[in-house]
Image (spheres, rainbow, N blue to C red):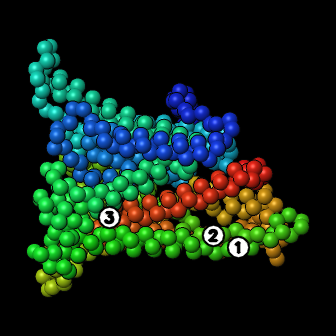
């Protein structure tokens, strides 16, 4: 009996969003997506009961990417969903889980297993956040008759874990609602919404920590938006330093946006003929063939490394290894600003040598070593996940060749044999997969070093998500205007 057979009774009892018998019209799809996004924002503003007022997690730099908000119902965000996908991809890719994703039955079982694993990870990660100290439950309370202090603490910890886990489970089902009744995917929608909200608020927020208006020097401007800080700090810091410290993140966010939009339009067209009539068509292989999936998986993996490092902090050797690794995979945000304002000196070179020898990032030299290691690891991880995703999503040369044959499409000048088509696709898809995954990894890494608003990775993901959302909206509108096309390609 396989693991899929053994676990089938468990994942079959999980609630499931019913597939619509008839595809809803475009307006209803947009409405469902909007409802899911509104619920996501509402959950991001509901504080978990029983937490210390000053609680703050160590993953705040990654919470935009994970569509999370530390201390609220979406504290762990989409982390469990993405981690479940990563684990199963590794199991299938390594041959440990025998499953044929081209078979509808196996694909349905795989989806059920992924949901079961995601639900389990919701509770596991919620427990990790609480018991590792990333979230701080209230340690004292009014005395309750019949309950000891230890009993109260245990109860309070469990209540916090339950709230955080249920919040992530709700996101899991909202993602399922969007994928079946809405536009795009819930995961992408939540990431884009979180990044957009973060960029807008960090740049234009007029309030300081005390809730006072802090525009143009009114009130304390330390916590106000970067635009207001730029103007307020010009008299004391000068235009250049104030611009570097406050406006450079916004400039780099715009640059990342433009680069991704340009890269989205780069593609190679493979000529095709359709049917016996020889109707000419083409199959576009985009430069960003892997989309932004590798970056999502890589950043989610980095976040989980930090979680497990917190768990194993007191375990000999393993704890030290995970602690060092978790330090490396945290992006040195704002590194470029520091480099511009401080410059390179002989002391920096000494710090570089010392940081390489001890793997302790000391001073600007240590930040340089950290930046190189971070970009190298992020890019390599993106390439690995890119190759996995292409095969798992049925986008590899063999799968595409079979799809083209079933559609009656062939490459002109070659025999009508899927093996021949696959050889032609082998010239394009594998190299573009590696180049595209490396490109998104490098771009996200370098943008993170600049401290771009919403983080470079967040901007990269948001642009890709919005671009594909636009394509899907255009396709849905076309299908609605021309029902025959919907029946032909559905």
Q: CA distance from mark 3 to mark 2?
A: 31 Å
> Quick check: can you spot residue 136?
yes
Q: Mark 2–mark 1 contact, CB under 8 Å? A: yes
Q: Residue at x 14, y 13 (%)?
A: 146
Q: Nearer the viewer, mark 3 or mark 2?
A: 3
Residue bearing the label numbered 2: 285
Please state which of residues 388 and 264 is positioned toward the viewer in this rendering. Answer: 264
| Secondary element at tag 3 | loop
Please tell me which of labels 3 and 1 falls first in the chain.
Answer: 1
Whether residue 286 is situated above or below residue 50 in the rendered picture: below
| Quarter of the figure that contains the N terminus | top right
Determine whether label 3 and label 2 are within 8 Å by CB. no
| Residue at (82, 77) in percent of width and height | 413
Which residue position is annotated with label 3?
A: 453
Q: Which residue is mark 1?
A: 270
Measured from the top left, where is residue 265 in percent x and y?
A: 57, 72
Q: Residue at x 54, y 70 (%)?
A: 264
Residue at 51% in and 45% down: 33
Between 108 and 96, the residue placed more toward the observer is 108
Of pointers 2 and 1, the one earlier in the residue sequence? 1
Query: How packed is label 3: few (under 14 Cα within 10 Å), some, or many (20 or more)?
Result: many
Q: Position of residue 487 (x, y in %)?
A: 76, 49
| Front-lying residue, 251 or 394 | 251
Query: Callout 1: 10 Å neighbours few (<14), some, many (20+)?
Result: some
Q: Quadrant of residue 431?
A: bottom right
- Nearer mark to the viewer, of 3 and 1: 3
Disc 2: CA contacts within 10 A as few (<14), some (14-19) or many (>=20): some
Q: Position of residue 382 (x, y in %)?
A: 45, 64
414 to the left or right of 465:
right
Q: Is residue 137 positioned above or below 101 on the image?
A: above
Residues at circles 3 and 1 in contact by the CB criterion of under 8 Å: no
Q: Earlier in the sequence, mark 3 or mark 2?
A: 2
């Amino acid at each position: 009996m396989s693991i899929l057979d053994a676990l089938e009774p468990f994942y079959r009892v999980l609630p499931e969003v019913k597939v619509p018998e008839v595809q809803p019209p475009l307006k209803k799809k947009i409405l469902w997506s909007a409802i899911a996004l509104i619920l996501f924002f509402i959950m991001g503003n509901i504080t978990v009961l029983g937490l210390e007022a000053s609680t703050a997690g160590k993953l705040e730099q990654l919470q935009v990417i994970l569509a999370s908000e530390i201390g609220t119902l979406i504290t762990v965000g989409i982390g469990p969903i993405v981690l479940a996908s990563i684990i199963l991809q590794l199991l299938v890719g390594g041959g440990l889980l025998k499953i044929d994703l081209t078979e509808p039955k196996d694909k349905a079982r795989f989806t059920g297993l992924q949901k079961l694993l995601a639900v389990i990870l919701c509770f596991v990660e919620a427990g990790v956040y609480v018991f590792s100290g990333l979230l701080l439950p209230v340690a004292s309370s009014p005395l309750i008759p019949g309950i000891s202090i230890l009993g109260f603490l245990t109860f309070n910890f469990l209540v916090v874990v339950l709230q955080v886990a249920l919040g992530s489970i709700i996101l899991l089902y909202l993602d399922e609602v969007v994928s079946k009744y809405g536009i795009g995917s819930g995961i992408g929608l939540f990431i884009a919404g979180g990044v957009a909200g973060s960029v807008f608020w960090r740049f234009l927020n007029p309030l300081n920590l005390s809730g006072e208006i802090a525009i143009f020097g009114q009130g304390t401007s330390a916590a106000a938006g970067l635009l207001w800080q730029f103007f307020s700090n010009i008299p004391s810091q000068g235009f250049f330093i104030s611009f570097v410290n406050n406006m450079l993140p916004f400039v780099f966010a715009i640059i990342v946006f433009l680069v991704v939009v340009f890269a989205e339009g780069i593609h190679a067209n493979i000529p095709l003929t359709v049917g016996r009539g020889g109707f000419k068509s083409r199959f576009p292989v985009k430069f960003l063939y892997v989309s932004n999936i590798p970056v999502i998986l890589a950043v989610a993996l980095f976040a989980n490394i930090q979680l497990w490092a917190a768990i194993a902090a007191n375990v000999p050797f393993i704890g030290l290894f995970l602690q060092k690794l978790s330090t490396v995979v945290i992006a040195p945000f704002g590194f470029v600003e520091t480099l511009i304002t401080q410059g390179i000196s002989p002391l920096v070179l000494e710090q570089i040598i010392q940081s390489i020898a001890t793997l302790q990032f000391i001073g600007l030299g240590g930040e340089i070593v950290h930046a190189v290691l971070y970009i190298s690891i992020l890019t390599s991880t993106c390439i690995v996940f890119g190759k996995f995703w292409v095969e798992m999503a049925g986008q590899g040369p063999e799968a595409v060749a079979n799809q083209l044959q079933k559609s009656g499409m062939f490459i002109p000048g070659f025999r009508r044999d899927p093996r021949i088509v696959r050889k032609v696709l082998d010239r394009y898809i594998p190299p573009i997969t590696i180049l595209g995954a490396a490109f998104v990894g490098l771009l996200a890494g370098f943008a993170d070093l600049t401290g771009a608003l919403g983080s470079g990775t967040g901007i990269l993901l948001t642009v890709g998500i919005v671009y594909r959302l636009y394509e899907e909206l255009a396709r849905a509108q076309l299908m609605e205007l021309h029902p025959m096309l919907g029946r032909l390609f559905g």
